[in-house]
Image (cartoon, grey):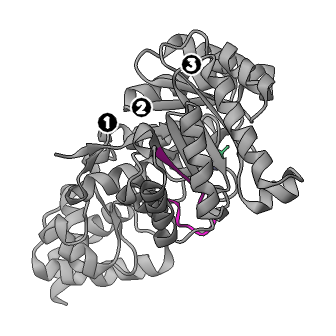
Amino acid sequence: MSEKVFIFDTTLRDGEQVPGCKLNTKEKLDLALQLEALGVDIIEAGFPISSPGDFESVTQISKAITNATVCGLSRAVQKDIEVAAQALKFAKRPRIHTGIGTSDFHIKSKFNSNREDILARAIQCVKWARNFTDDVEFYAEDAGRTDNDYLARVVEAVIKAGATVVNIPDTTGYCLPYQYGEKIAYLVNNVANIDKAIISCHCHNDLGLATANSIAGVISGARQIECTINGLGERAGNTSLEEVVMVIEQHKHLGFHTGINHKQLYPMSREVSEVMRMPVQPNKAIVGSNAFSHSSGIHQDGFLKDATTYEIINPEQVGAGLSKIVLTARSGRSALAHRLQKIGYQFNRNDIDFLYEKFLQVADKKKEVEEDDLHMLAKAYTPELATH
Ligand code: KIV
Ligand code: ZN
């Protein structure tokens, strides 16, 4: 039996922290409704104490969302938690996400404190939050660089205080996948009450390892992934939702599933890109414009014989339309014949051999040979030319 991995979307909180990605309440509300339709389990709607605008957004999203859990972020500060609870008061399923830095970097440099004091503050913030809701998620900021022994003590104590989800963020994107996986396994094996909470992965992408780390975390026992559409987030971003969802889908042998409607992944990516004015890099996995494009002759020939030779995902599975055969100077004869046929020209092998030479002359001058160029080539051609 496959086990569910909960998808916690933080596009509207961690994603929105990206410079230039700030959204107004209407934009946030529209995206929240689309995230719910996509099938995310938890929507982190914002950080209510951070600004009146964010408070209003969390309030409106709480009113509008019917199925997903709506979550508000806070620091380990009583006022933050009270304000988060107020913004979430209309939510059908409210969650308060509270926590504190647990690495020595944070304890010493940020808080000028010590481990025992931070442990007490962690317990306290969970207790405050539990006064408002039964669904309290605790984050141990910079858990990626936190000593495992101390982290296990903190996690055990916050679960005892009432945390139902324990978030283990690799805030700086520092961990290697095996290290992050071992960290989660350490908690599974050394926290006596770990069965009373869900472990959550929140991995940043500073070394390009966020997706790999999140999957390593799930393999080791985590059952929630925090992620964003297009991997948006602080600095190099967060774990990309579409990537982790499709890793889980493509590797069913791992024994997991999510509730995400895969066909909405591509449209959702485009929507977020547009609203946040943040283009998607063309080679981005799953949702980049080149993710299902084939341009070299060897690949095109194989793909045209059988798509699975060069594609592990059918683009229609993620709502990305059809695969593309792009014509460049690296393309081959079969791709040229295929594209010509698609726009209505049927040529025999001899004709194609001749046309291919002409095609290369155009392709060497241009980055990509377009449909108009193909019409020009085809119309200028008569079979007699090929025999000369
Ligand atoms: O990266 C991080 O540690 C965070 C926490 C606030 C959850 O975003
Ligand atoms: Zn983060």
Q: For numbered disc 2, what is the local secondary structure?
A: loop
Type of the residue with mark 2: Asp
**Can you identify the residue that label 1 sits on?**
259
Type of the residue with mark 3: Thr
Quadrant in the picture for residue 310: bottom left
Q: Residues within 10 Å of mark 2 (few under 14, many from 20)?
A: many
Q: Residues within 10 Å of mark 1 (few under 14, many from 20)?
A: some
Going from N to C along the chain, the mark reached first, 1 or 3, is 3
Q: Work out whether residue 114 can be spotted.
A: yes
Q: Is mark 3 within 8 Å of ligand 1?
A: no
**Can you identify the residue that label 3 sits on?**
133
Going from N to C along the chain, the mark reached first, 3 or 2, is 2
Of residues 306 and 375, the one drawn nearer to the viewer in this rendering: 306
Q: What is the residue that sits farthest to the right in this orientation? A: 112
Q: CA distance from mark 3 to mark 2?
A: 17 Å
User: Which residues are drawn in magenta?
Assistant: 199-210
Task: Answer with left or right where residue 104 lies relative to residue 161.
Answer: right
The label on residue 41 is: 2
Quarter of the figure with the C terminus: bottom left
Q: Residues within 10 Å of mark 3 (few under 14, many from 20)?
A: some
